Image (spheres, rainbow, N blue to C red):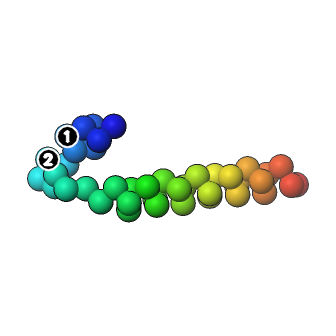
Amino acid sequence: MHGIIESLSPEQTQIDWKWVGSVFAFYVVLMIGGVGLLLAQ
């Protein structure tokens, strides 16, 4: 997974994985919240 993202941005080899993880976690929370709202109706 790291190699795929690094190959997409070769000029920036140093990637902040904490930022990537936090964005992914935020996305997961949004998806869970959206499903919860759909099921609550």
**What residue is rendered at 16% in x and 51% in y?**
13
**Horizontal side, residue 37 vs residue 16: left or right:** right
Q: Is residue 35 left or right of residue 12?
A: right
Question: Which residue is under mark 1?
Answer: 7
Query: Residue at the location (88% across, 54% down)?
Result: 41
| Number of marks | 2
Viewport quadrant of the N terminus: top left
Q: Hey, which residue is sitting farthest right in the picture?
A: 41
How far is the residue under mark 2 from the one under mark 1? 5 Å
Q: CB of mark 2 within 8 Å of CB of mark 1?
A: yes
Left or right of 11 on screen, residue 6: right
Q: Position of residue 37 (x, y in %)?
A: 78, 57
Mark 1, secondary structure of its residue: helix
Q: Mark 2 points at which residue?
A: 10
* Amino acid, disc 1: Ser
For residue 2, above or below residue 24: above
Q: Position of residue 2 (x, y in %)?
A: 29, 41
Circle 2: is it few (<14), some (14-19), or many (20+) Cα within 10 Å?
few
Residue 36 on image: x %, y %: 77, 54
Q: Which residue is pictured at 58% across the width and 52% down the height? A: 28
Name the element at disc 2.
loop
Residue 33: give x, y in percent of width and height. 70, 57
Q: Which residue lies furthest to the left in this view?
A: 11
Residue 30: give its label: none
Is 9 on the left-hand or right-hand side of 37?
left
- Disc 1: CA contacts within 10 A as few (<14), some (14-19) or many (>=20): few
Q: Which amino acid does label 2 sit on?
A: Pro
Image position of 18 with respect to 1: above or below: below
Residue at position x 11%, y 53% in the image: 11
